[in-house]
Image (cartoon, rainbow, N blue to C red):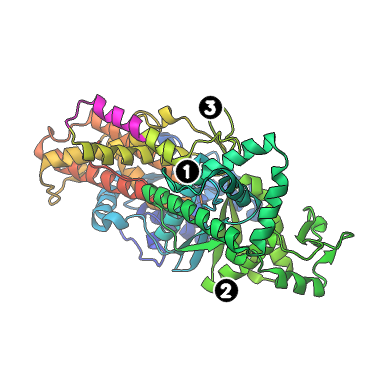
Amino acid sequence: MIIKKKNNSELISIITQEVLDQINQAIRVLGWNYKVQDSDLVYPSGKEMGDLAFLCFRLSKGLKKPVNIIAEELKRKINLTDLISSVKNINGYLNFYINMNKATPIILNKIIKEKKKYGDSNIGQKKKIMVEFSSPNTNKPLHLGHLRNIVVGWSVSQLLEAVGFKVIKASLLNDRGIHICKTMLAYKKWGGNKRPTIKPDHFVGKYYVLFEKKVKEDIGLQKELLEILNKLEKKDPSITTLWKKLNRWAEIGFKETYSNLGITFDKVYRESEIYKKGKKIILEGFKKGIFKKDKSGAVIADLEKYGLPNKVLLRPDGTAIYITQDIFLAVLKFKEYKLKKSIYCVGNEQDLYLKQLFKILELLGYSWAKDCYHLSHGMVFLPEGKMKSREGKVVEADDLVLKLKVLASEEILKRGLNIQKTQLSKRSLEIALGALKYYLLQVEPSKNVYFEPQKSISFIGRTGPYVQYAHARICSILRKAKHLPFSRIDYSCLNSKEEKELVMLLAKFPLIVKKSALNYNPAFLSQYLYRLAEKFNLFYENSPVLKANEKTKKTRLLLISCVKIVIAKGLKLLGIAAPEKM
């Protein structure tokens, strides 16, 4: 077997490369003008349909031929190799069947050699991408809705780093505005200058909810609220001191939550530092005729011709609004970091707003406007419906993690394990966070999530703990084996259906990482890890490892070691721990 070395060989599995080589060689022989990429290949749903398939309809438009004829002509020109045992034309799909006896040692040796780097590539070539996520208001603690944004943003960042991009993880703190003033007014009137006796962001959030309650009883509070806002804008010393104090408490609380979640940022922007900036950019755009004024005197972007509503950029009195600062921030990001792409991980309620922002940046003539991308995600719903921050009807992030941690502890103790208290706490937190993050990531970002805490923590089914348990189970087997004799392996021992399916799944991992990264979609990886864990459990139920004969035992230990490496790496890319004991 000859496997040609290619610059992009690290991007795809060896099997995929072999199939691509043969298809492209056949296309050249036929004189057709098309180069097949790995994105043109799919994994058939049933084993009888082969291991990889080429979608021949990609050629039908250019060739003006039925896909069945295209597939048949290609099939005749495909050369069988040591890796490719047969090729079939099935309804216009060119289906390839892999010789697993040849492929298995190549795949498993590659995983053992590369270990934690298996699945990594250099697609990104160190180009800089900023992923902005978790942009909370400093008037309340992070809640379940924030958590989805955080885990999606973090996982996408990890995936992009795995395929070779230089990622800047950024957050924008919304630390000013009317919502912050609500908390300030409530604390000023009823806080009694108290210091936090609970987690500081929770302490601050109590006064936001209190204001919303009190304003229903006394509408005069709205006038006082505007007075607070006006004083803050004019940098009144006492109000500025109060603002700094409450923001500091909120940020301390946020940092603790981020730390528990394993989240860090490379850059934190603050609305208070940029909200007046951008006005100059707008006025220059107005002078050039890019923008105009409406009857009230407000500067607006005329976007109707682009199928979008017009957008106010400056108020009639010339003061800046939210989009003014976002225009400036976009310019600042690209200027500071020379970005290849700027990804905004923001909920889908901002879909229209971000379309307007990107179009305005394009109208202003910024060539990089096309490189701004909205990673839109759906909402998180509880069984009782949507959360409401103003009424205090939210599931706060810290409380949810604590609840899941208790549930995880109960699951661990059900198994009758004799475990120290500190170890129980550590393990139950890893499982709790695994349950939470996996549940939120297994659904495509664009879709809504209906979160069920009890279901998420289960060790059975499509859950994070199920995948974590598969990893822990392998660790247990390897501990009992004591040593891993990976020399003189007889790969012919891996001949059962379950073993072959495991090897094929392991071979797919680099492609799954690439697909998840380039589509900004951790759900592909989440779903893959569940299938891998499921296949491992099926294998383990039907194939003894430690009780097998010595030759088979060595080979199966190698196989499950590779499964362990891939599960651990996959979980890491999702921001989930891979416990060695459950």
Q: Earlier in the sequence, mark 1 or mark 2?
A: 1
Say what secondary structure mark 1 lies in: helix
Name the residue carrying label 2: 335
**What's under tag 3, amino acid-wise?**
Pro
**Residues drawn in magenta:** 405-418
- Label 3: how many Cα within 10 Å (few below 14, some 14–19, many 20+): few
Q: Residue visible at 76% across and 74% down?
A: 284
Q: Earlier in the sequence, mark 3 or mark 2?
A: 2
**What's under tag 1, amino acid-wise?**
His
Name the residue carrying label 1: 202
Relative to residue 102, is residue 362 depicted above or below? below
Q: Mark 3 and mark 2: span between their CA atoms?
A: 45 Å
Is residue 104 rendered to the left or right of residue 68? Answer: left
In front of the other: label 1 or label 3?
A: 1
Q: Mark 1 and mark 2: span between their CA atoms?
A: 36 Å
> Is residue 359 something that shows in the picture?
yes
Say what secondary structure mark 2 lies in: helix
Q: Nearer the viewer, residue 17 or 572?
A: 572
Q: Residue furthest right?
A: 295
- Label 2: how many Cα within 10 Å (few below 14, some 14–19, many 20+): few
> Is residue 570 something that shows in the picture?
no
In the picture, which quadrant includes the C terminus?
top left
In the picture, which quadrant includes the N terminus?
bottom left
Q: Nearer the viewer, residue 184 or 483?
A: 184
**What's under tag 2, amino acid-wise?**
Lys
Q: Position of residue 418 (x, y in %)?
A: 16, 31
Q: Residue visible at 13% across and 35% down?
A: 546
Say what secondary structure mark 3 lies in: loop
Q: Which mark is residue 106?
A: none
